[in-house]
Image (cartoon, coloured by chain):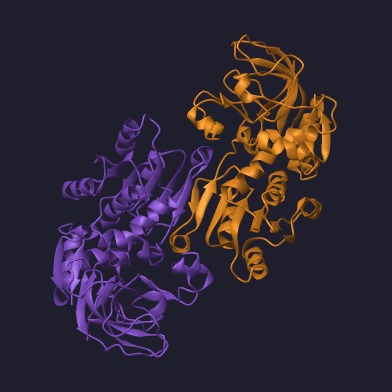
Chain colours: A orange, B purple
């Protein structure tokens, strides 16, 4: 089959790799119908040192079950299913408490002999735990929306949930990328009344307004902080969802959070030390979040997509064929595209 | 009156200062019966650069109300009362949600013309909001226990509360100082079943065992982390209370916390950057805590002292007269004393 490999920064190729087959009785093989490029794929796209053992890319996909191992109980050939961005048994103590990203029996796509998601097919380990059956046909118009359950919508939702967003809250979302916009959708779903979206790309923040943002702050840094404080009686907001992953964004988060409030970060941090010292200590700021256990949220969020209450697939503003995925990466990296959908 | 001034590291003097008087109708004047030296007082004791405008020391005291301003309603001359370690109106939005440390109308002891707590008396601003009446006489044997409501017990309790300690939990407490031992008391009060106390001072950890610790880990750093993991099936504990304030202690906290768990820090951080990067992000670790709004907890904790369920005053293992307070500082700094009680 054809799959996406990254050999170096800006060097993404589609090549022939081995067809997936059942290796364990708990495996399934899925023919991929839709996948996409993640904002986090852009970090290696910007920086990966040249390598002879290229990375197998992609961790967001849905498709049709083609084959199942002898122990797979919840899926059968022909089912349409979505995969969360890590695979997991969904039965261990961590999984049962909704932290499938820490499942000791699970793992990541594209490593250790497991396929990546940007290809024509994938072997899915622990298929009963990992895959969630979708009650739609493979030509459903909802597929792009449902694909966001793999990662981006659930990541935004994780930010909102771990920040404790609830009815009537005022929330700041930092970042107008696909995760930030998903965080807007999520904050709205959880009942936030006022959602201040910090971002400076007009077309993206406009989409954020249709998703439920009530205010847009285009300024960044100190100026952005001052603007949010101005909008909130000087206090900042109790909940801040940091959806970027850069240190400046997190510092901005501490700047706009109200004393006693919570900053939840879901942007993969591109730094190791968090500037979070005595002043933040005096203000009782909580820093939470982390990599999203998407699997924990799929069943909860799916009905909102099926009944049309939310349309998170609107974050996809470009579609490429698998063979053209390198251009899909480029377009996202150049900020021509917000998020690229890939049709194998 | 006599009061404690710090002129430089290791230079603590008791000198004459102006007697406190009512300046605002919301003030009270308290004759101090008991005060103490805080672990946080040791930071300037180790490092304060020589100054001609010495610091007025002390933020933990209880005493007898001697005078009240015209607007004071809840206290009268002769009442015994305890002061939390910041003063606050206790009526604003922050105070009502239990974050008196962020009260915009409040402030700290010993600055801006407000007396410190290590003296013979103090003017208490916003007395109705700040002081809590104690239902005991000024010669009560419970006074040392009740004095811990000023700061140290409430600080340990804040760690336990913000970490979310609840019935049946396993908790790690880092630090065997007075705050760490107060955190042990607090975790026990909140129903923790297993409390692992990390500390290497035998007499202190022994006291911790009588307060409710179930395990003591004397090792530090990687060795200490390994030991806690060994005690917890490899996973670490869901709740970690960091009661030191040094970077190494916080790193140790991240080392012993279970994936998805919470580290609450209440030791005043002596550093600005927290090493809290991608690996912690992948583990969904929350960092919370901060300076304790002691005022929020006093009414809740006082009954446990009055009915003898807890005896937090056992952290005081040295008593000095006010005139000898310099030796009380020295003894704590040299780790001869755990916490020094001061009788003006």
Residue at 41% across, 89% down: B24
Q: Position of residue A61 (x, y in %)?
A: 72, 28
* Residue B253 as seen in the image, left or right of residue B332: right
Image position of A94 with respect to A170: above or below: above
* Residue at left offset 50%, top offset 58%: A285
Residue pictured at 50% horizontal, 32% vertical: A94
Instruction: Please state the horizontal and vertical placement of residue A203, each as a whole percent of the image.
Output: 81, 52
Front-lying residue, B26 or B253 = B26
Viewer-nearest residue: A38 or B169: B169
Q: Is residue A263 visible?
A: yes
Quadrant of the image containing the C terminus of chain A: top right
- Tell me residue B324's x, y (percent): 14, 73
Horizontally, residue B11 falls left or right of residue B157, namely left
Report x, y in % for residue A147.
74, 33
> Along the line of sight, which residue is nearer the eye, B200 or A81?
A81
Q: Relative to A60, is B335 above or below? A: below
Q: Residue at x 80, y 31 (%)?
A: A143
Quarter of the view holding residue A253: bottom right
Tell me, yes or no, if residue B329 can be seen here. Answer: no
Residue A228 figure quarter: bottom right
Q: Measured along the vertical axis of the image, is residue B250 above or below residue A133?
A: below
- The number of numbered discs placed on residues in the rendered structure image is 0
Q: Point out the image quarter for the N terminus of chain A.
A: top right
């Amino acid at each position: 089959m054809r799959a996406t490999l990254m050999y170096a920064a800006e060097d993404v190729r589609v090549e022939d790799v081995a067809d997936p087959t059942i290796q364990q009785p708990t495996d399934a093989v899925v023919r991929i119908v839709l996948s996409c490029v993640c904002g986090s794929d852009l970090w290696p796209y910007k920086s990966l040192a040249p390598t002879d053992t290229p990375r197998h890319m992609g961790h967001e996909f849905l498709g049709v079950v083609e084959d199942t191992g002898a122990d797979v109980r919840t899926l059968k050939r022909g089912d349409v299913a979505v995969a969360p961005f890590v695979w997991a048994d969904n039965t261990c103590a961590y999984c049962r408490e909704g932290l499938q990203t820490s499942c000791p029996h699970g793992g990541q796509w594209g490593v250790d002999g497991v396929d990546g998601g940007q290809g024509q097919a994938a072997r899915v380990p622990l298929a009963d735990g990992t895959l969630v059956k979708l009650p739609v046909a493979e030509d459903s118009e909802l597929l792009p929306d449902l694909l966001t359950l793999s990662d981006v919508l659930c990541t935004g939702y994780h930010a909102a949930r771990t920040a404790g967003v609830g009815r009537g809250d005022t929330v700041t979302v930092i970042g107008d990328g696909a995760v930030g916009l998903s965080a807007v959708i999520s904050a709205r779903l959880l009942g936030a009344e006022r959602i201040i979206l910090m971002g400076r790309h007009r077309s993206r923040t406009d989409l954020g307004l249709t998703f439920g943002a009530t205010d847009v702050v285009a300024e960044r840094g100190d100026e952005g902080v001052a603007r949010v404080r101005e909008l909130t009686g000087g206090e900042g907001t109790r909940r801040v969802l940091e959806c970027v992953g850069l240190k400046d964004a997190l510092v901005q988060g501490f700047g706009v959070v109200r004393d006693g409030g919570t900053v939840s970060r879901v942007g993969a941090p591109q730094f190791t030390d968090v500037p979070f010292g005595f002043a933040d200590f005096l203000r009782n700021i909580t820093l939470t979040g982390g990599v999203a256990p998407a699997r924990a949220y799929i069943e909860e969020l799916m009905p909102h997509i099926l009944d049309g209450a939310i349309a998170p697939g609107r974050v996809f503003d470009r579609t490429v064929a698998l063979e053209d995925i390198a251009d899909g990466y480029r377009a996202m990296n150049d900020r021509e595209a917000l998020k690229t959908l890939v049709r194998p």
